[in-house]
């Protein structure tokens, strides 16, 4: 099969399922043309074919009796002809390796093998039983690492939908040891959404987040999940059957535990601290097997291809799996130099070239979210300051009326082809990351966009900017280095050291290669009137001395560029445990998670496949 032209994000991320799946679930016939269109997409092996295939598998397993024989046979052909993994023969345009895709491909392979255990699959000549056994190993490993370390695509209001769908089908149709663990990982997804939601929206610092969802949370891909789980969105909310989240809505054996639902509805105030993923420096120690399908896939789930720590294994996988024609990875051929590989010099080449693609890697995030009934602030504390970025959304302040405030240093995509030309961009990710740290309602940011140019880096922009949607505020102030806004009885203020600011409705542009910002949230209940809040921020101490940025409010905050964060002279440790919240406390790599919320208890033990829930005084197995 020849390489397929990439169809672009607009096509790939839409119509992953079909509206008629709800009719089939009710035992009714439906228009089958959209099902056949999904088969066409899968057969072409376009990127995101796995999104469609999991919906076809759900349809075939649960609703075959309501389909025509011709359509059922067509789905069967697509299942038996698909390429399920990079080590199978054939060229294609698919991304297999990101965190959500690894789960989807393995789930599809496992379920397909279960449908046809004795049939020979056309692409590689293996039986369904062989496919199922291989995929089961990968699935259990993927789920175990998420339980231990959290999600690499942390708090993603796009990709949590892609995770929930295959986990839901596995919960219904996998062997019990896999099904229970799938339900446990679903619990963790919904726990994240409960911890970090405000005013009915999932609005947290995130490993992967796109422009539309950042600027307007009504467009977030997880909204169907939030309504089904927590009732967010109101009684007139309409589900979209063309979304992959339809598979969660149709799941028969999983319900979000009451403890998690009650967390979602707790208005605060409270702080959530969590640790997600691994730093590249930790991977070899934590993932001791250097096998391609173990450490290799974990690195690629981080999107760590051209980093010093990953490049030798990346190139070994690239060669062994014949990925020269893959739309996403073909440019790795530029560094596929035998003598450098043989002499172990690829890491040195990365150090010399300093490729901007290093910033694509999603490393460990230590997120602080402070939630009140009036506002929420979520920050990936001290996330790789001064380094290249990609799709990471490092902070967001959220006020009522879906008023989202955040900043970026605009970047440019490193490639021009449709598969890779959407990030970083004006609103997505960062060209260079800021040094940022927060405590409760106060955030400090230092942007320093100077430094050595990276290989493949486009023109570096000499400004940073804030999303500040004027039309959503009842009242705003723009006065030199001071900017503030009010929504109902909730407030936000921005102090900077940049005198000249450009404004364009929702865009505050701050020119300069080095800039400093204090962002403070408040409300009438805490600070009185908006004018009193503004006066308090204006009177605050604000000073920059070399690498030190200091703000004095009720306490003194010091952010020393790339050196740390302190409050009242005491260094703040921003390397968090797996969870430190009012509802669950657990170290990194927990053996068990025990969640208490408003009289409800949930116990999750991955290794023993135990998931128990019930009133806090007596848990029962569920």
Image: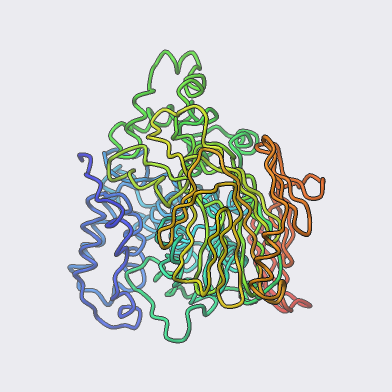
Q: Is residue 596 left or right of residue 459?
A: right
Q: Which residue is drawn at 44% across and 45% down?
A: 410
Q: Is residue 410 left or right of residue 4?
A: right
Where residue 224 appears, x then y in whole percent? 44, 72
Q: Which residue is drawn at 55% across and 77% down?
A: 230
Between 408 and 289, the one nearer to me in the picture: 408
Q: Which residue is drawn at 44% across and 74% down?
A: 249
Where residue 149 appears, x then y in whole percent? 62, 49
Outermost residue toward the bottom? 235
Between 25 and 377, the one nearer to me in the picture: 377
Residue 294 drawn above or below residue 499: above
Where residue 362 appears, x then y in whole percent? 52, 44
Which of the 4 image quadrants contains residue 116?
bottom left
Between 144 and 376, the one nearer to me in the picture: 376
Which of the 4 image quadrants contains residue 330?
top left
Between 320 and 377, the one nearer to me in the picture: 377
Q: How many labels does the image show?
A: 0
Where residue 158 appears, x then y in whole percent? 44, 59
Which of the 4 image quadrants contains residue 559?
top right
Can residue 512 be seen at all in this image of the molecule? yes
Residue 344 drawn above or below residue 362: above
Which quadrant is home to the N terminus?
A: top left
Can residue 607 be seen at all in this image of the molecule? no
Give the color scheme: rainbow, by chain, secondary structure or one colour.
rainbow
Q: Which residue is drawn at 57% across and 78% down?
A: 488
Which quadrant is home to the C terminus?
A: bottom right
């Amino acid at each position: 099969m020849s390489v397929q032209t990439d169809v672009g994000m607009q096509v790939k991320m839409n119509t992953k399922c079909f509206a008629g799946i709800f009719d089939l679930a009710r035992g009714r016939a439906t228009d089958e043309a959209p099902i056949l269109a999904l088969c066409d997409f899968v057969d072409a092996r376009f990127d995101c074919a796995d999104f469609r295939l999991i919906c076809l598998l759900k349809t075939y397993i649960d609703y075959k009796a309501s389909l025509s024989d011709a359509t059922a046979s067509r789905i069967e052909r697509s299942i038996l002809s698909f390429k399920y993994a990079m080590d199978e023969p054939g060229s294609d345009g698919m991304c297999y390796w990101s965190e959500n895709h690894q789960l989807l491909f393995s789930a599809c392979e496992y379920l397909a093998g279960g449908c046809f255990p004795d049939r020979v699959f056309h692409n590689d000549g293996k039986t369904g039983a062989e496919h199922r056994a291989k995929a089961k190993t990968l699935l259990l490993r993927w789920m175990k690492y998420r339980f231990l370390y959290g999600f690499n695509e942390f708090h993603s209001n796009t990709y949590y939908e892609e995770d929930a769908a295959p986990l839901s089908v596995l919960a219904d149709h996998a062997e019990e040891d896999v099904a229970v663990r799938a339900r446990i990982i679903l619990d963790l997804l919904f726990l994240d959404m409960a911890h970090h939601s405000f005013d009915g929206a999932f609005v947290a610092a995130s490993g992967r987040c796109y422009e539309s969802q950042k600027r307007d949370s009504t467009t977030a891909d997880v909204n169907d999940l939030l309504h089904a789980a927590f009732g967010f969105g109101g009684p007139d909310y309409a589900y979209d059957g063309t979304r992959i989240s339809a598979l969660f809505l149709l799941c028969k054996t999983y319900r979000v535990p009451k403890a998690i639902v009650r967390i979602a509805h707790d208005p605060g105030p409270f702080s959530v601290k969590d640790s997600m993923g691994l730093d590249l420096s930790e991977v070899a120690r934590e993932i001791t097997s250097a096998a391609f399908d173990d450490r290799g896939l974990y690195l690629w789930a981080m999107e760590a291809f051209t980093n010093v720590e990953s490049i030798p294994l990346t190139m070994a996988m690239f060669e062994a799996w014949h990925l020269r024609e893959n739309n996403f990875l073909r440019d790795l051929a530029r560094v596929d130099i035998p003598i450098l590989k043989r002499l172990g010099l690829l890491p040195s080449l990365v150090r010399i070239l300093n490729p901007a693609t290093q910033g694509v890697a999603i490393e460990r995030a230590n997120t602080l979210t402070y939630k009140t009934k009036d506002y929420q602030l979520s920050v990936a504390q001290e996330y790789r300051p001064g380094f290249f970025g990609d799709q990471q959304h490092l902070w967001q302040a959220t006020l009522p009326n879906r008023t989202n405030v955040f900043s970026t240093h605009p970047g440019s995509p490193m490639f021009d082809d449709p598969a890779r030309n959407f990030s970083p961009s004006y609103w997505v990710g960062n060209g260079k990351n800021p040094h940022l740290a927060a405590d409760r309602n106060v955030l400090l940011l230092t942007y320093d966009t100077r430094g050595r140019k990276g290989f493949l880096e486009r023109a570096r922009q000499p400004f940073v900017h804030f999303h500040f949607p004027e039309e959503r505020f009842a009242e705003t102030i723009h006065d030199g280095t001071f900017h503030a806004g009010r929504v109902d009885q909730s407030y936000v203020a921005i102090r900077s050291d940049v005198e000249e600011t450009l404004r364009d409705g929702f865009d505050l542009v701050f020119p300069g290669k080095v800039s400093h910002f204090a962002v403070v949230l408040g409300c009438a209940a805490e600070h009185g009137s908006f004018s009193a809040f503004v006066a308090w921020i204006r009177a605050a101490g604000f000073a920059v001395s070399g690498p030190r940025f200091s703000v004095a409010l009720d306490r003194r905050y010091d952010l020393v560029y790339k050196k740390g964060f302190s409050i009242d002279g005491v260094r703040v440790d921003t390397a968090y445990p797996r969870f430190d919240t009012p509802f669950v406390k657990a170290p990194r790599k927990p053996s068990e998670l025990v969640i208490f919320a408003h009289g409800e208890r949930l116990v999750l033990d991955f290794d023993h496949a135990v998931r128990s829930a019930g009133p806090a005084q007596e848990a029962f197995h569920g």
